[in-house]
Image: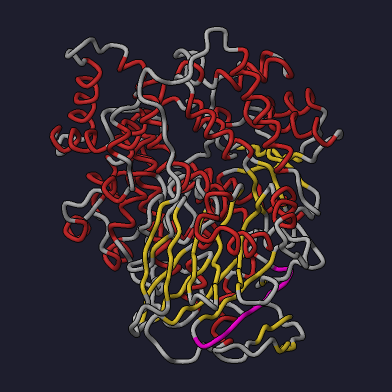
Amino acid sequence: MCGIAGVINLESTASIRQSMLERMADAIYHRGPDEEGYYVDEAVGLAHRRLSIVGLSNGRQPIFNEDRTVAVVYNGELFDYIEVKAELEAKGHRFTTDSDTEILVHLWEEYGESMVERLRGQFAFVLYDMRKRKLILARDRIGICPLFWAKRQGRLYFGSEIKAILASGEVRPEADRQGIDHVFNFIGMPSRRTAFKDISAIAPATFMRIDLDVGSHTADLSEHRYWDLDFPDAGEERNDRDGSAIQEEYESLFKRSVELRLRADVPVVGYLSGGVDSTTLMHTAMQVVGRSIPAYTMKIDTKELDETDLALLAAKRIGSDPTIIPCDGKVISGNYPGLITAAESPVIETSSSACFTLAKEVQATGYKVALSGEGGDDWLGGYPWLKMAKAMDSCNVGQVRPGNWIRRFGVRVNSPGVSWQSIKAIQDHVGGPNGYGDLYGMVSLSRSRFYSDEMWERIGDHHPIYDLDLNQDRLRRWHPLNRALYLGYKTMLPGLLLNHKGDRPAMHHSVETRYPFLDEAVVDFCATLHPKWKLRTLRRDKHLLRNYAAKILPSTIANRPKAVFRAPFADTFFANPPTYVDQLLSEESLKKTGYFRQDQVEHYRRIYRDYPRWQHGKRLVAEMGLAGVMATQLWHHLYLGGGLCELSTWEPKSSPARPSRELPRRESGLKSELLTVR
């Protein structure tokens, strides 16, 4: 993958300076240290940083169509580009590179805006049609590749990361408290909202169209969703009697997905935890290439969280010799400032720092591409909160709903200040009770524990659930498990797994992660199936995947219970805190930001210091909340002016100097174009 950035004149007539584009590109140098390129005319400036993976010798961007009237800057991989390129060549299109990027300009010529529905892979791109005076800013279906934008002074600024927008010098950072509230509800940033006021994300499966000429001096902006996860109505799901055809089709689709994601002009490695997802993935990948693939395994230095023995057992079975990366509390806390810098938002989940460490080691050993098992749980019901919801819902008979009584009791015990009416309104908004709602209900208890009066005033009555773009007409007709999977697609995947644990820590180290379980064909197929092919019983999740794994792996791996990848919270930050944590959580620093209650922060810090064996259930939720407080203070320090601790703040940096030359392009009806090559 790569990094893109740029400026679009919506109302302004001021010239776009290439020096500004260079600053924006330099801010995301880590996303593409191999090459850079620029395009500028009177209306649009495009910048690109390249991580060379496909078409190494001739894939420099921006890339143009045959007559250079369409340009694109692109981040990602289109895995079926070989087949699509052949189809386009048969229609008369001429290609000049070996890069997958070039199919975008020709797909635009052939299909216009409907091209996005044909793309298979992970991507974010900005395409500029100079003749039509139109731009498209688009993002992939699942939300693997990020893309952000902001409007200032008649211009739109965009970038793969918010850093690029800030580096323009025209957009000043300011906190969006409703954006911060997303982290304390969803453990991530899943919607258009970010932690920065008036800086927005393009939502997954969405494109923004900008028409520069609309009969006035103001450009026309419109947003369009081109896909959404959908399920059959409850009772109409595919449910073959013997299931052999379903099993065979799933295995065929998954193997093809793995095969496509091994396409690269550089070596591909993989992450291996020892769970059924990553082990099945790595075994399948090795079968495709016919040899061992380098594997990387994280060793968490906490007995109940360490999965190294299981990972080594899995590695031995599939014929791999994994690199083991040790990760203890000091490593996690030491990396956290870098992680927050990468994520550009508070990060609650400490395992994200472990992912940061993992990507750092992949880069250090000379690799650029890693396969990841993320997504295996998300379509086949692998998470424990989905099982808990199934158990509660199994108690319901007709209008008698003991499952909801249990949920109501949990609210009363853990958060007496929150009314059941408020909880029910949120449940109704997502089509009824489900596992993700239960999870986020527990996570959000930290709001009532830690938020200051000022924070509550700034948030108001707004709840983050209402920022999600949900298909409410459809979701009420689905099976409860499918409603939960849909909510996970809208929240956990884009907000946590593909953001705080995916793109941001990986690309901070110039590593592209690929996700075979998130292939479009695999996702669409799983959505058609009856829930029994996913979460079959309380003891049998990921039924299709485990059936496949049983054919190629020992039972101890194929039937291994799901273990959520976690790293320690309290032991990392609060039992023996690093200096910056004490500084961030001091009374003075908490007063400066005004987000959190000083007395509650001190109360819970004292608990971890004085009562190390406090009740585990309550402790875990409170640990996450206090970690969120620390992470928010750290984010504020890094991006909003410092002054909270002794750590350095984030500042735009220049990329390493390289010789440059300016290549003249054709004269257009606008102005002469320049593409700077370095």
Q: Is 37 in the magenta?
A: yes
Instruction: Report whether residue 59 is seen.
Output: yes
Q: Residue at x 51, y 80 (%)?
A: 44
Q: Residue at x 48, y 77 (%)?
A: 133
Task: Specify the principal SS of the magenta part.
Answer: strand
Q: Is 482 located above or below residue 247 in the figure?
A: below
Q: Nearer the viewer, residue 358 or 120?
A: 120
Where is residue 11? Give x, y as percent: 37, 84
Q: Is 455 in the magenta?
A: no
Q: Of all residues shown, which one is farthest toward the right? A: 291
Where is residue 593? Give x, y as percent: 30, 65
Going by the image, does 359 lie left or right of 496? Answer: right
Q: Residue at x 38, y 57 (%)?
A: 192
Going by the image, does 171 lie left or right of 647? Answer: left
Magenta-colored span: 33-42
Q: Is 149 located above or below residue 188 in the figure?
A: below
Which quarter of the picture shows residue 525? top right
Q: Residue at x 35, y 53 (%)?
A: 629
Where is residue 465? Give x, y as percent: 28, 45
Q: Nearer the viewer, residue 307 or 266?
A: 266
Where is residue 66? Give x, y as percent: 70, 72
Q: Is 206 located above or below residue 200 in the figure?
A: above
Which quarter of the picture shows residue 248? top right
Q: Nearer the viewer, residue 32 or 411?
A: 32
Going by the image, does 666 lie left or right of 401? Answer: right
